[in-house]
Image (cartoon, rainbow, N blue to C red):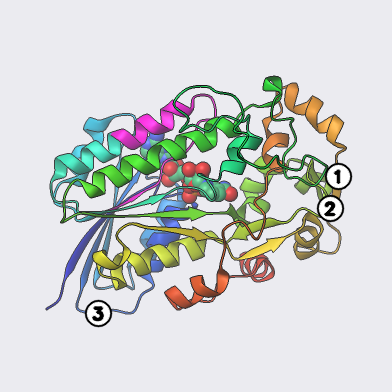
Amino acid sequence: MPSTTTLVVTGASGKQGSALISSILSRPSTENQIHIRAIVRNSRNDRCKALLQKTRSSTNTSLTFFEADFSDRGSLEPIFKGASALYLNTSPTFKDAQEEVKHAKNILAAADASVTIQHIMYASVVAVDDPNIWSRLGGTAPWAPEDTGPDTSIPTPDYRPGSCYVCDPMDETCRLGLQGYFSAKYTIEPLVQEWGNASPSRSWAILRPSWFMSDFLGSEAEYHWPELSSQKTLKTARSPTDEMMLVAPSDIGLIASKIFLDAQPAQWNGQIINIGSQALTMDDIAAALGHNFRVEYIPRDEAVQEVKGGNMLREVQAWCIPRQACFDLTSLEEMFGVELMSFDKFVQQARD
Ligand SMILES: NC(=O)c1ccc[n+]([C@@H]2O[C@H](COP(=O)([O-])OP(=O)(O)OC[C@H]3O[C@@H](n4cnc5c(N)ncnc54)[C@H](OP(=O)(O)O)[C@@H]3O)[C@@H](O)[C@H]2O)c1
C-alpha cells in the first residue's frame, strides 16, 4: 500500500537541510507521497526559491516553507501538527552554548506536542563524545558530575604542533568557542535519545558529520578562511601533517533521505552514524582548490596569542579529527549503497 511521510526539516535553507530536501526531490517517483515542511526564518531568500524550483519536476513530493524561530516554541507547534518525522538541525551561536540547547528543547517539545511525530534524526557533530576532545578542550568532560580537573585515565594528548589543537588544555585563557560548541551538541544528543525512548512507537537516530567541504568555497570560505579569496591562501594554525576529515553536505542529505525513506524505523532506531568521506591535509585541500592556492602555517605561539586575543577562527581552523578516530568509509558506503564524494569532485561540481 502506498505510504505518506510528512517530514519536518529544520534549518531547511542551510547546507544540510537543503541537501536533504534536494535529495528527496531528486528521487524517482513512486506511489508513496512525501510532504516536506521546511522551517526557516526567512523563506524569501534564493536558497528557498531554488529548492521550490526543483519541486516542479516531482509529482509525488510537496515542499512548503514555514517561517518560525527555534527560540519561539509557539511558532513551531502549528507546523509540527500531523507530521510524522523530523530532521532536527540547530545552529550554534558561539556566544552562549545554552542557546542551541534551548532551541533543541523547544523543537523537541513541539514534536512532543504534535503527538504524531514518531521519528527524529538529529544532526550533531563528529566525535562529540570522544574523551580526547574534552581533554583537549580543558580536561573536564561535560558528563563529569563535578569539576574534578583533568581525567587522568585519558592518555595525555600530544600537544606538539600537529596535534589539531592550538591551546594548552590547562590554559583557560586560550579557549573560546569550541568547548561550548561541542558541549551544546553533547547535551542535545541524550535529549533526543530520551525523546525517542519515551515510547516504543518512536525512533531516533543521530548523524555525526565531520567538516563540510562547502566551508572551503563561496561565502562559507569567506567566513572560515578570510584570506582565501583575496590572497588564495589558507592560513591555519594546523600543522602540515594534520589531516582533516571532510564530507560533502550532499552526502549527509543523501544518507538522511535514505534513512527516512528507505529503511524501516526499527532499522535505524538508536543508530549513531559518523559521516566523513575523505581525510586531507591542508596542502591536499589547497591543491584541490587550484594550482595557485597555497597554505600559510601559523607558528603555534602566534596562533595561541591570536586565540587569546579573541580570534576564535584560529581555534576552529586548527581543529581536526584524526582519520582513524571513528570513520569506516567502506562500511558507510556499503550500509547505504552510496559512493561518497571526494573533495576533488566536490570542487569540480561546485564550479560547473
Ligand atoms: N560546517 C561544518 O563543517 C559542520 C560540521 C559538522 C556539523 N556542523 C553543524 O551543522 C549545523 C548547521 O547546519 P548547516 O551548516 O546545514 O546550516 P547553515 O547552512 O548554517 O544554515 C542554518 C539554517 O538554520 C536556520 N536557522 C538558524 N537559526 C535559526 C533559528 N533560530 N530559527 C529557525 N531557523 C534557524 C537558517 O534559516 P534562515 O537562513 O532562514 O535563518 C538555515 O536554514 C550546526 O549545528 C553545525 O555545528 C557543521
Q: Quadrant of residue 106?
A: top left
Dot 3: few (<14), some (14–19), or many (≥20) neighbours within 10 Å?
few
- Mark 2 vs ligand 1: CB below 8 Å: no
* Secondary element at image label 3: loop
Depth order, front residue of 308/26: 308
Residue appearing at x 50%, y 58% in the figure: 274
Numbered mark located on residue 240 in the image: 2
Highlighted range, magenta: 86-105
Q: Position of residue 234 (x, y in %)?
A: 79, 48
Residue type at tag 1? Tyr
Please tell me whether residue 345 belongs to the stretch shown in magenta.
Answer: no
Q: Quadrant of residue 28?
A: bottom left
Q: Is 249 rendered above or below residue 153?
A: below
- The mark that comes first in sequence, 1 or 3, is 3
Identify residue for label 1.
297
- The mark that comes first in sequence, 2 or 3, is 3
- Are the residues at dot 1 and dot 2 in contact (C-beta closer than 8 Å)? yes
Quarter placement of the C terminus: bottom right
Identify residue for label 3.
30
Residue appearing at x 20%, y 54% in the figure: 202
Dot 1: few (<14), some (14–19), or many (≥20) neighbours within 10 Å?
some
